[in-house]
């Protein structure tokens, strides 16, 4: 069975890293802001999505399963 290891980072560091990376790609401040905002929202969107099974696991549906992030199967 594969175990997924999650890493936590303070939100401010994530945003600062996104702006640093975007500033290497463009000199236009509006473009840098747009790219950084898109990348942060994409990362946060992936982190907040979970899958929910509509069929209960187990033979009688008695076993409980925690929601898993999308792609973690």
Image (cartoon, helix red, strand yellow):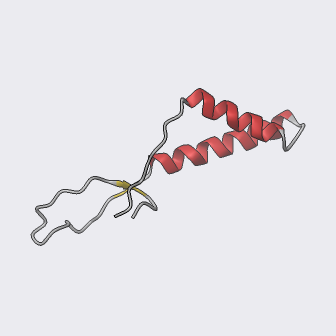
Q: Quadrant of the C terminus?
A: bottom left
Q: Is residue 11 left or right of residue 53?
A: right
Q: Is residue 23 above or below residue 62?
A: above
Q: Is residue 26 left or right of residue 13?
A: right
User: What percent of the width, then of the height, locates residue 62?
Assistant: 10, 62
Q: Is residue 23 above or below residue 42?
A: above
Q: Quadrant of the N terminus?
A: bottom left
Q: Is residue 7 left or right of residue 40?
A: left
Residue 34, picture quadrant: top right
Residue 33, picture quadrant: top right
Q: Residue furthest right?
A: 27
Who's the residue at 90% across and 37% down the image? 27
Residue 41, picture quadrant: top right
Q: How many marks?
A: 0
Who's the residue at 56% across and 30% down the image? 11
Q: Is residue 3 left or right of residue 56?
A: right
Viewer-proximal residue, 57 or 45? 57
Viewer-proximal residue, 6 or 15? 6
């Amino acid at each position: 069975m594969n175990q997924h290891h999650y890493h936590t980072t303070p939100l401010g560091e994530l945003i600062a890293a996104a702006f640093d990376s975007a500033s290497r790609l463009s000199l236009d401040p509006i473009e840098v802001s747009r790219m950084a905002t898109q990348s942060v929202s994409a990362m946060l969107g992936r982190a907040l999505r979970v899958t929910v099974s509509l069929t209960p696991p187990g033979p009688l549906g008695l076993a409980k399963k925690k929601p898993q992030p999308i792609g973690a199967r």
